[in-house]
C-alpha cells in the first residue's frame, strides 16, 4: 500500500509562488508515475503535471506550462510542485497521486493511490 500526504497549500495573491510537497510512504515502487491533479467544486479532477519516478520524464497541462514545475527527491521520497505566477484560475484542491507502471496518463482514473488534498487559493 502507498500513502501520500500533501502539504504546502494556502492563500496567496495573484502572481505569487507556492510549493506543494507530497510525502510518499509505504510500498517502495520502482516502476511508477506520480502526478499532481486539481479539482474545483462540481468540476472533474484534472491533471496538472506528472513525472516518472525513476526516469524523471515530465508532462504538463497546457494551462500550467512555463509556470509550474514538477520534481521529485527519490532519497526523501517526496514529490514537489513549484507553482509560479499563480492566477485566480489556479484556485483548487490539489491532490498528489501515484500509479504503478511506466505509462503517463492524464486520466485520473488510471491512478491507484491518492492523498487527501491541499487547498490552494489565489486571490485577485
Image: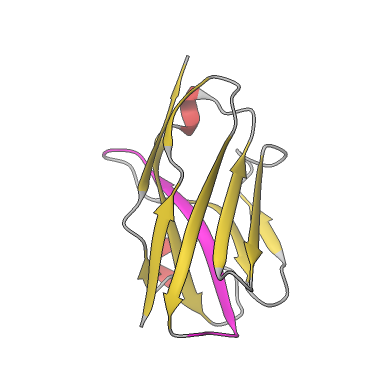
Q: Is residue 103 above or below residue 59?
A: below
Q: Is residue 103 above or below residue 108?
A: below
Relative to 68, is 78 on the left or the right?
Answer: left
Stretch of the chain drawn in magenta: 28-41
**Front one among 79 and 100:** 79
Instruction: Estimate the x, y position of residue 69 in percent, counting from the top left.
Output: 67, 48
**Extreme left residue here?**
42
**Front one among 63 and 99:** 99
Relative to 93, is 32 on the left or the right?
Answer: right
Residue at position x 46%, y 52% in the image? 37
Residue 114 lies in the magenta stretch: no
Residue at position x 60%, y 31% in the image? 17
Image quadrant where residue 67 sits: top right
Residue 43 visible in the picture: yes
**Extreme front residue here?**
76
Q: Is residue 45 above or below residue 86?
A: below
Residue 105 visible in the picture: no
Amino acid at each position: 500500500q502507498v500513502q501520500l500526504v500533501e502539504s504546502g497549500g494556502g492563500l496567496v495573491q495573484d502572481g505569487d509562488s507556492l510549493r506543494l510537497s507530497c510525502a510518499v510512504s509505504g510500498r517502495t515502487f520502482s516502476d511508477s508515475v506520480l502526478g499532481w491533479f486539481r479539482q474545483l467544486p462540481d468540476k472533474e479532477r484534472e491533471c496538472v503535471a506528472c513525472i516518472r519516478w525513476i526516469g524523471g520524464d515530465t508532462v504538463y497541462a497546457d494551462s500550467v506550462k512555463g509556470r509550474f514545475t514538477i520534481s521529485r527527491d527519490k532519497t526523501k521520497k517526496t514529490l514537489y510542485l513549484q507553482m509560479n505566477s499563480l492566477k485566480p484560475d489556479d484556485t483548487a484542491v490539489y491532490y498528489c497521486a501515484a500509479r504503478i507502471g511506466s505509462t503517463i496518463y492524464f486520466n485520473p482514473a488510471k491512478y491507484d493511490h491518492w492523498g487527501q488534498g491541499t487547498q490552494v487559493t489565489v486571490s485577485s
